[in-house]
Amino acid sequence: MPGHAIHPIDIIRKKRHGEELSQAEVEHFVHTVVLYGEQKIAEGRGEHPTLLAATDKISEAQIAAILMAIFQHGLSHRELAWLTNAMRYSGETFDASSLNTFTVDKHSTGGVGDKSSLLIAPIVAAAGLEMSPSISVPMISGRSLGHTGGTLDKLETIPGFDTQLGLVRMAEVLRETHAAMMGQTPKLVPADRILYAMRDHTGTVESPFLITASIMSKKLAEDLKGLVLDVKVGSGAFMPTYEKSKFLAELMVSTGELAGTRTAALLTTMDEPMGRFSGNWIEVWECVDIMQGRRHPMSADLIELSTILSGWMLYFGGKSATPEAGAQLADEILASGAAYKSWLHIVAAHKGDTSIFTNPAAFHKPKASRVLKASRTGYLAGMDCTEVGWAVQRLGAGRTKPGDPVSAHAGIESHAKIGTHLKIGDPIFTLFSEDEALLAEPYRMLEATVAISDTRTEPQPLIREILTRDTVSL
């Protein structure tokens, strides 16, 4: 801390006028936020809170005011780097130095049916196991919220699969399998837990600067040497416009590179569900089918995206001369069965039951289903993919707030992609639920959002743009 005292009200006044905060002020803000969180935890347990010095105290109202000032005025590149770094080191961090491996991860801003992590981790891990130099994937993932799915919810449909490893066991799993897939530990980036909850209550969730600090602080806490970002654009994306998605991607790339992590962001289309299935277990089933060599036509976009993202990870890790060569290598690993072998090792290391992959379709046992059929002959012209995501959520596969239970077997199967020619009565979606009463509303939502046209709509390219340190300002 600097020689002079820093008070929250001074930070509020400075940022309220759009002035740049100093590194000390940013770090002090994060420091006081963590202490505030610790005080709240102590109070919740009925313990007597630690007596804090006046300069270490910050109120909920003051945190909210600083977040709103950032929302209104943004942050400079320096402020964003300082905020991200302070959040990154606000709790425990992973140290990969003893593993002697190139650590690389992938992050998606969230989509419908976006299960690429389930393919990417075993693909890259297989390359790490079978080829020099060493490469590993320390993948810390999240749960579903709102209209988007969560990797942890999908993994936890596998009987016994433990996503709460802790950092020590994470290192052991990485040594064994070259990939670990787990949730955020309670002590990892605690500042983000507090600030995210406050953002939700103060209407500041959408700030690209606060989103960047939240995402990148958690990813950098994995001790990554490389990071590939899948930033969605289109009707199912988190950000409302292409321009805002691109701005967020630019911020994340520059923040990663300034932290010493090779970072690339791919802007990818999310105008319809990715792949064949959207849900939890059914997405695992789809990926297992692919790894076992069964490539359903509806999974073509998922396979393409997964191999392209894997290709960038393999390129960063020195496995290929170019990202394109990396994508080709990823597809070869997938086709050879090496990714499936790696997947079995990863699941077993997480105490998951691998026997269910012998016949993954048989494990899918929803209690009710309903088919949405084409009301007329024509071409599938489009849909509001966010609305499709909400339909999946209301079938029981997602949650509206943290802590809500999710169904393993709820979701939808897509039978057509944008541009597909349909005859009247052809299936478009099959809805699955564990409660028949939950089918009606999602059915109406899907029926209302699907558009069929007399003329074919050309779908957007899957990869819209790629951003690297060569194309963004640092």
Image (cartoon, rainbow, N blue to C red):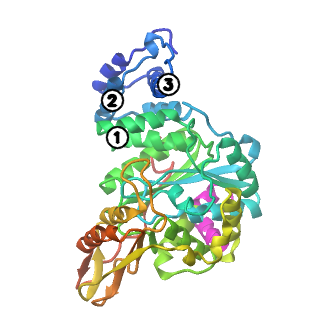
What residue is pinned by disc 3?
42
Q: Which mark is residue 121?
A: none
Left or right of residue 90: residue 103: right
Q: Earlier in the sequence, mark 3 or mark 2?
A: 3
Q: Is residue 323 visible?
A: no
Residue 113 percent location from the top left of the image? 44, 66
Q: Position of residue 198 (x, y in %)?
A: 37, 35
Q: Please name the residue that numbered disc 1 is placed on.
A: 200
Is residue 303 placed above or below 152 in the rendered structure?
below
How packed mark 1 is, by other alpha carbons closer than 10 Å (few <14, some 14-19, many 20 or more), is few
Is residue 199 left or right of 127 when viewed as pictured? left
* Secondary structure category for the residue under label 2: helix
Observer able to see residue 397: yes
Residue at the disc numbered 2: 64
Give the crowd class for mark 2: few <14, some 14-19, many >=20 residues within 10 Å: some
Q: Earlier in the sequence, mark 1 or mark 3?
A: 3
Kind of residue sitting beneath label 2 = Ala
Residue shown at 68% from the left, 74% from the top: 337
**Labels 3, 2: front one:** 3
Mark 3 to mark 2: distance in Å? Answer: 21 Å
Q: Position of residue 314 (x, y in %)?
A: 64, 60
Please report the residue visible at 29 percent of the width from the left and 89 percent of the height from the top. 425
Q: Position of residue 192 (x, y in %)?
A: 47, 36
